[in-house]
Image: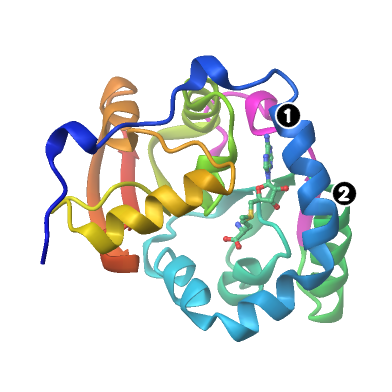
């Protein structure tokens, strides 16, 4: 398959990101929230991508950041986990709360921002974050927070878009399309390395554009 030149693997220029980015995206999520369940039904690949995290959840105290409609939570929840969740969008939060109530799942779900997680340092055994990191304006701040609340030896499980390792054109185009939609493509390997995680980077779909990072806090 045709390969993109290394010089074209360019990450989003964050100097052009406006300070009200999160609020702007939030307005989009307001109208997306109602259709999100339907989107996942007509595009089941999405479910498969995010469900990759399930066998890697370890320990008791679990935090899911940006859980959206709460679908993934309904899949991994069991009586051994104490589940906490943070989601920025109020409508998504309401949908997720309704969903877990209907299934008798116990989880403490709160509105909040990844950049300011309302938890003490070293609290969680596993932190889950799926298809959300490219929607954060400041990857550095977000990664610092995800790491801070994670216990030493705890797991950070991230599923999101990044360029395909083999630079194939189809995966590259998917990433570019996502960027066109307004997301911020970040060099996840650089961020995880900078924050001293030990990690594995697996390609789980989208011609290598959907990555699953299984990271451990040293
Ligand atoms: C594409 S959805 C992904 C939802 C779900 N995790 C999934 O895999 O389907 C991204 C979610 O991130 C949330 N989000 C965006 N910015 C956020 C922030 N700064 N803090 C917390 N959540 C945020 C959005 O409200 C939205 O629900």
Q: Is residue 52 above or below residue 121?
A: below
Point 66% across, 55% down: residue: 67
Residue 92, position as x, y percentages in the image: 80, 57
In which quadrant of the rendered view does residue 57 lie? bottom left
Residue extending farthest to the top is: 15
Q: Is residue 157 left or right of residue 97?
A: left
The answer to whether residue 158 of the structure is visible from this angle is no
Q: Earlier in the sequence, mark 1 or mark 2?
A: 2
Front one among 94 and 104: 94
Q: Is residue 168 left or right of residue 17?
A: left
Q: Is mark 1 within 8 Å of ligand 1?
A: no
Is 123 drawn above or below residue 145 in the view shown? Answer: below
Of the 4 image quadrants, the one containing the C terminus is top left
Q: Is residue 15 visible?
A: yes
Q: CA distance from mark 1 to mark 2?
A: 16 Å
Read off the residue under disc 2: 90
- In percent of width and height, residue 115 lies at 64, 25
Residue plotted at (14% across, 37% down):
6
Q: Quadrant of the N terminus?
A: bottom left
Density class for disc 2 (Cα within 10 Å; few <14, some 14-19, many ≥20) is some
Q: Residue at x 33, y 49 (%)?
A: 213
**Residue 61 shown in magenta:** no
Identified at 29% across, 47% down, the residue is: 163
Report the span colored magenta: 107-124
x, y percent for residue 177? 46, 53
Q: Nearer the viewer, residue 124 or 202?
A: 202
Q: Nearer the viewer, residue 136 or 80?
A: 136
Q: How would you rate the neighbour count of disc 1 (Cα within 10 Å): few for under 14, some for 14-19, many for 20 or more? A: some
- Give the percent coordinates (x, y) of residue 158: 43, 49
Q: State yes or no: discs 1 and 2 in contact (Cβ < 8 Å).
A: no
> Which mark is on residue 118?
1
């Amino acid at each position: 398959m045709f390969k993109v030149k290394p010089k074209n693997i360019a990450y989003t220029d964050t100097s052009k990101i406006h300070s009200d980015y999160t609020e702007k995206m939030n307005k989009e999520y307001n109208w997306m929230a109602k259709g999100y369940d339907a989107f996942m039904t007509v595009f089941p690949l999405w479910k498969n991508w995010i469900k990759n995290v399930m066998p890697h959840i370890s320990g008791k105290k679990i935090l899911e950041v940006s859980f959206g409609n709460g679908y993934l939570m309904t899949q991994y929840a069991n009586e051994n986990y104490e589940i906490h969740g943070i989601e920025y969008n109020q409508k998504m939060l309401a949908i997720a709360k309704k969903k877990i109530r209907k299934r008798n799942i116990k989880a403490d779900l709160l509105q909040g921002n990844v950049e300011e997680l309302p938890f003490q340092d070293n609290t969680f055994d596993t932190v889950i974050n799926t298809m959300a990191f490219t929607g954060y304006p400041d990857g550095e701040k977000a990664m610092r927070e995800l790491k801070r609340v994670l216990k030493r030896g705890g797991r950070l499980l991230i599923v999101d878009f990044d360029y395909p390792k083999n630079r194939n054109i189809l995966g590259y185009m998917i990433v570019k399309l996502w960027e066109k939609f307004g997301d911020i493509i970040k060099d996840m390997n650089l961020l995880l390395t900078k924050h001293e995680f030990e990690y594995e980077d697996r390609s789980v779909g989208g011609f290598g554009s959907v990555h699953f990072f299984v990271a451990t806090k040293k």
